[in-house]
Image (cartoon, rainbow, N blue to C red):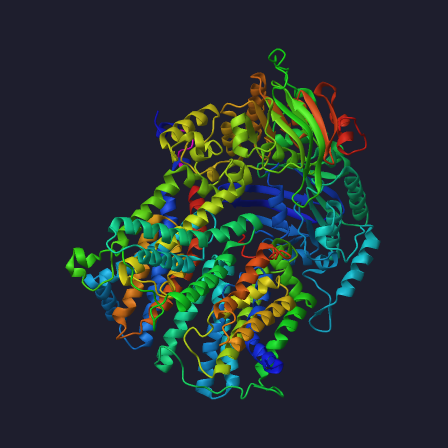
Amino acid sequence: MSVSSLAGGAQPTFAATPWRERAEEALIPPLVALLVALICGDLLILSYGQSPAAVYRLLLEGTWGNAYGFGQVLYKATTLAFTGLAVSFGLRAGLFNIGGESQLAAGGFAAALTGLALPLGTPLIIALILCMIAAGCAGGVVGAVPAYLKTRFGAHEVIVTIMLNFIVLALLNWFIAGHLHVPETLHTPEIHAGILPRLADINPRFHGSAANLALIVALIVASGVWFYLFRARGGYELRAVGLQPEAAEYGGISVGRVWMKALTLSGMIAGMGGINYVLGYKHYYEDGFASGAGFLGIAVALVGRNHPLGVLLAAFFFATLSQGGLAIHAFVPKQMMDVLQGVVIIAVATAVPEVRRVLRSARKRGDA
Amino acid sequence: MTPAIRMVGIDKSFGAIRANRGASLEVMPGEIHALVGENGAGKSTLMRILGGLMKPDAGRVEVNGRDVTGWSTSDAIAAGIGIVHQHFMLVPTLTVAENLVLGCEPKTRIVVLDYKRAADDVRKLSNETGLVVAPDRLVSDLSVGEAQRVEILKVLFRGAKILVLDEPTAVLSPPEVHELWAVLRRLRDNGATIVLITHRLDEVVELSDTITVMRAGQTVERIKTSETTPAEIARAMVGREVSLSAGKRVQPVQRPASPQPGQGLEVRSLTINSSRGIRVVEGVSFGVKPGEVLGIAGVEGNGQTELVEALAGLRPVLSGDILIDGVDITRRPVAARHDTGLSHIPEDRHRRGLILEYTVADNLILGVQKYFAKRGVIEKDRVMENAIQEISAFDIRPANPILAARALSGGNQQKVVIAREMGRDFSVLLASQPTRGVDVGAIEFIHQQLLEARSKGKAILLVSAELNEVLALSDRVAVMYRGKFAVVMPAAEASEEVLGEYMIGTKKGNAA
Amino acid sequence: MNPLSFLTQMIRIAIPYLFAASGGVVAERSGIVSLTLEGFMLSGAFGAVVGTHYSGSPWVGVLTGMFGGLVFALIHAITTIRYRADQVVVGVAINLLAIGVTRFFLKLFFASSSNSPRVAGFGGNIKAAGFDNPLLWLGLLSAPVVAFMIYRTPFGLRVRAAGEHPEAAESVGVSVERVRYLAVAISGILAGLGGVYLALDQHQFTDQMTAGRGFIAISAVIFGRWSPIRAAGACLLFAAAETLQIQLQGSHAIPSQFIEMIPYVLTIIALAGVVGRAVPPAALGKVED
């Protein structure tokens, strides 16, 4: 028996496709935000006496218009994809992980230590896996702390993750400054194993850009997150906790255990993002390399509507903004992009509830 | 005479729900006017519109002959309307006096709050009305009855001449109810107009001068109390003939002959503390045999909620044992209880029973999701098959498994819960307020399902605030009073009058 | 160690915290999450430098700095109160936006990506004999003034009601929206003043000069359990730890990084409830429809 035969008949209006509604609610806010950002961008460009059209063309040419720029966008998008996936994974369980900054840094640090500890000539695949495990564990530990404090003591994860950022970054700074640095720098020596090939090694047109195979890892992680959230039993339970913790508890789901799992995994995902810089780009850990990427992960998750595909697109978008700043710097200071990032986040955050309200009341009128 | 309140043709919708459609109300000055109707009939919405908390989509509101349609809360307060909400509108971290003056604070000089004067005003008003509460106490420390006194003082303090009380007795003990009646009569005799929202007919008949009946968002009748009977009001409320006594008792179905000892649900001296450490259930023992319905009656807040939650595994037990078919499950988590044969219809489907954003199909596996997963992956086809089966078996409408549960009506949402809990194999069912907020047709269906399960030899624990329901469905009836069973008796010997006395604690049994 | 120099240095460090934490208490008690203090301070600092630079008077700088904090506070208030945007998300974005905006205008006004030119201030600031910076006195007064406002005025009563049970406040005709707008505006002005002090004390604006001070202030609010006086105590405690770190520098007794952690570690401990659980206002961060 088919579903539609049951749904037909008595009340056909109710059987209307819920997919369209969901798509509208998901897509309109980012589009609104883009529009707002364009307007703000125009104003900023005009304040510098430049022509918006020319600057935007420059922006596109410098990012998507040539292989180097595009490679740089992909490189920046890779890190943002990791932190964005991390934030969105936590949000699906109803938890706000603002600790991406420190989880990413801890992951990068652990990857670098592992790469240093491994002997020269370790096969790449083994080194990569070991480095990723180390990075994931380091990020996971940082994520597990707020999870534990929340489950055990009810401490709010937003505050704890923020506070942990400062604590973990200070600890890492102490390690690097006091113990592990190459003299005159704030970074570790270069790793011996686990160096990821760059895209330029495969296609020379990307020459000079930092994009590397961590991009593929990010895509794999994104599909893994999608499968877990929407196909696995664990994801069913995780989303249930995020939507209605008391109903989940009633359904035999241990809310505390899901919280632990969600924030730990979220931290692991963010931590693994560290390989992009450490294994793929500089080949060492440097103090402050993660600066900003954790916070931007929140923006990426928000604009990507907590869906892995959306997160990838949003990561690409924010990476374009960031790389685009460099492309236009000769005409308008790249700091313009810092402004636009903030504008986009605020616009999306504002548009999400507003669009939902407007759409729902419009539908209601349509039904009546 | 100009009516104190006149509302005509009021429309108000929330999403797909039309709470009011052309509702009207006319209240004369100086009367106690009962606004009655089933849960969800639109009474509270109508009063919220009167109080300025909402604006009507259409219609006209007049107070003392003045058109005030769409006014604000502060306008309403200034015009002497005082609403005592069903859920107390008190700030728990503030003192009684602070709560009372909030929004119309007395000041010394320019900006400083005159707390002393506020406290004095409270005392003065307490003396005048007989509603005594110490002004300096924190509201979080008050009992429910005291909190309600503060609510009434609060509206009187603002000079209310028209008082609206929304289900004021839902949380009160019987002595507190009687005290409230005395206060309301006194206020009326001093010239106040009172609107009493309720769905309890005994209250209506006892107290009101005039009655307005609402059904499904519409006003269906306006009558003088002296010219009507409870049966007539009830008919107007539900739209058809109903019997008010336990007369609709269903003929007991033949039970399986002499069930095995130790089968069903057994509870031994169960003691439970609330999350704030207060003893809420104390040493309760009982058993429910296969093929039996044990009904628990009682004024809400006497430990029924906590008892059911503890049985379901949602609340820790201080001491005592819970057994299902002889298996001790006292310390087992929720999921393990499911496996032992426990099903549970929770009292609040919006909070616990359903994940409103999930589809009907996904909701139908909540709690048993592990049986629909293979190696950690949900088997979508089986989930959908199961949904199609349950939707037709329990007549869930619209019959669309991929619709979000949020889009269903209350009755159909409850059917989803019931389909899930009763559509699977179980031996013990906890049914908590199974028909709350559900339309009449669905109520009948749910009652039928419960009785069918009984005849199939399931042990059923029924907790309901509706005395009729308890009397109609149960084999035995227990009354919970202050965390204990005041009495347990065969339903055949029980009546509303008898149970009522145990419920209010005037009569104490030996069933503790 | 000279106790007097310790005390003066501690107070100097504490002033920005005191301003911002007092502001944070007001906003949070009204139910609005104050992760924005960092951004308010930064825009306040920038506003002060711009005003002082173009007018030559630090008093004008005080006004423009307050205005800077207020503008960002209004963005936060309108998006979260009027449009019910998520307070944490907008909070994070406000901080990013403040960094971006100050950078952009630093470049536009002063053609620099790191710092502004030197501007006037309030003179010698601290002498052994006493404090001659009016902002310093204002900062010390901010906590008691806010405490008085919260506990002794009708507005404060409404702020507390809005943060604990907004429906109750609404039901007696109090406009929760208006109370929250005012509370957030006050927090923006106060935190902005914290930034003003910082910038005028250093006689210039530097990129990201608040360097996490807004987060220390929010730590103080939580560690002080949302009471203005206790939050001020926390500010002084955190400032004392920092002073200790500075004065011990070179002795290598404790690595400076560990002293930096103190406020954050204490806040986490307070949240975990090891010593007296910190319970936030009931409606904090909640969005009601």
Q: Position of residue A262 (x, y in %)?
A: 44, 47
Answer whether residue A10 is magenta in the image: yes
Q: Position of residue B407 (x, y in %)?
A: 46, 39
Would you place residue C185 above or below residue C273 in this image?
A: below
**Which residues are drawn in magenta?**
A8-13
Give the residue at the far front of this rendering. Answer: A119
Q: Is residue B22 visible?
A: yes
Q: Which image quarter holds the N terminus of chain C?
A: bottom right
Q: Residue at x 33, y 59 (%)?
A: A112
Would you place residue B7 above or below residue B226 in this image?
A: below
Would you place residue B283 above or below residue A97 in this image?
A: above
Answer whether residue A299 is magenta in the image: no
The quarter of the picture where residue C208 lies is: bottom left
Q: Position of residue B341 (x, y in %)?
A: 54, 25
The quarter of the picture where residue C158 lies is: bottom right
- For this rendering, which residue is in front, B350 or B375? B375
The quarter of the picture where residue A300 lies is: bottom left
Q: Position of residue C201 (x, y in %)?
A: 51, 82
User: What is the chief secondary structure element of the magenta stretch?
Assistant: loop
- For this rendering, which residue is in front, B186 or C133? C133
Q: Is residue B363 left or right of residue B119?
A: left
- For this rendering, which residue is in front, B28 or C84? C84
Q: Is residue B57 visible?
A: no
The total number of labels drawn is 0
Give the residue at the far top of this rendering. Answer: B257
- For this rendering, which residue is in front, B453 or A24? B453
Q: Residue at x 80, y 39 (%)?
A: B175
Q: Residue at x 72, y 42 (%)?
A: B33
